[in-house]
Amino acid sequence: MPRPVDVDELQERLLGAGYVADAGLATALACAVSLERAVLLEGDAGVGKTDAARALANVFGARLLRLQCYEGLDLAAAAYDWNYGKQLLAIRAAEAAHERTPDLYADEFLIRRPLLAALGAERERGIVLLIDEIDRADDEFEAFLLEFLADFAISIPERGTVAAEHRPIVVLTSNRTRDLHDALKRRCFYHWIGHPSVEREIEIIRLHLPDVAPELARDVARAAAALRERELRKAPGIAESLDWAQTLGILGAERLDASNFEPSLGSVLKYPEDIELARASAAAIISAAHPSTSSG
């Protein structure tokens, strides 16, 4: 993998991979790759944190390993485990053949979960390790990551320390449902991904949905921005904007208007109270989607 990485070049290559990154995000990713440090991406759900890791793997032709975090995640699910069934069969086979019991902690019995698998990155291809939604994991697992992120190594009591010969690119994401510990943040580059500007969101919609009319893409981006200004339980992210544009296309809409606004709300808002709020503000939101007509 090329190091150091030029920021402008990476931004252009991410665009070629279908991801519209602003200068700040491209800088954080380029620095993390160049200096072989993890990068922590925080932001609301649906702003493109996970897709940034996917695009990064695409750019470098790397294999993407994803560890989805959840409450109760432990080492057996995240790092490694032993194939106890296979070990038992090996013991029985050795006893039946009156042979010496084999090494039960040999590679053939080791199950490599994402963290351990990421340490085996090949020089030619490389690995992008996505540790997704780290804020959902427990404090204990977050503490375990400190060794991994500091040394790119995992201590296995039966085997010793396994260290990476070629460090993977590591991307952590967080929806900030809880604060992460400072020790974890110190081991990472940090970037907050906010909701995109209207112009950037139009570009994203046009990139991912080239068949959507330019006028409809602009309407959706402006309306999504207007929705985010309201006190919603869950503000729509980029993923919801894309769903909204596709839904309106299925409905045969050329523009967002009063006839298709309410029927399409289920694609962009996910809570009944948010839908009711949007219905009550329908005129203002549709007006925001058509600034030229509303001002005239």
Image (cartoon, rainbow, N blue to C red):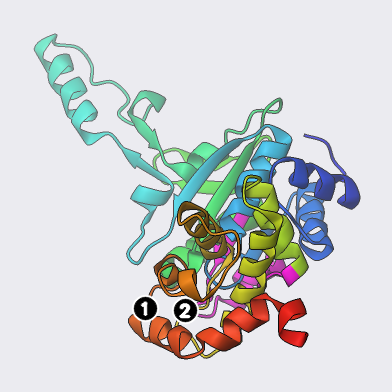
Residue 59: where, in percent of width, then height?
Answer: 72, 38
Q: Residue furthest top?
A: 97
Numbered disc 1: secondary structure: loop
Closest to the observer, 82 or 177? 177
Residue to which mark 2 is pinned: 234
Span shown in magenta: 171-198
Closest to the observer, 90 or 224? 224
User: Which numbered dot is residue 107?
Assistant: none
Residue 91 sits in which quadrant?
top left
The residue at 44%/38% (across/down) is 159
Residue to which mark 1 is pinned: 271
Query: Against 45, is 248 above or below?
Result: above
The residue at 45%/90% (across/down) is 280
Closest to the observer, 166 or 67? 67
Query: In this image, 4 relative to 86: left or right?
Result: right
Q: Is residue 95 found inside the magenta-colored segment of the image?
A: no
Residue 14: where, in percent of width, then height?
Answer: 75, 46
> CA–CA distance between discs 2 and 1?
8 Å
Residue 235: where, in percent of width, then height?
Answer: 52, 78
Residue 15: where, in percent of width, then height?
Answer: 76, 46
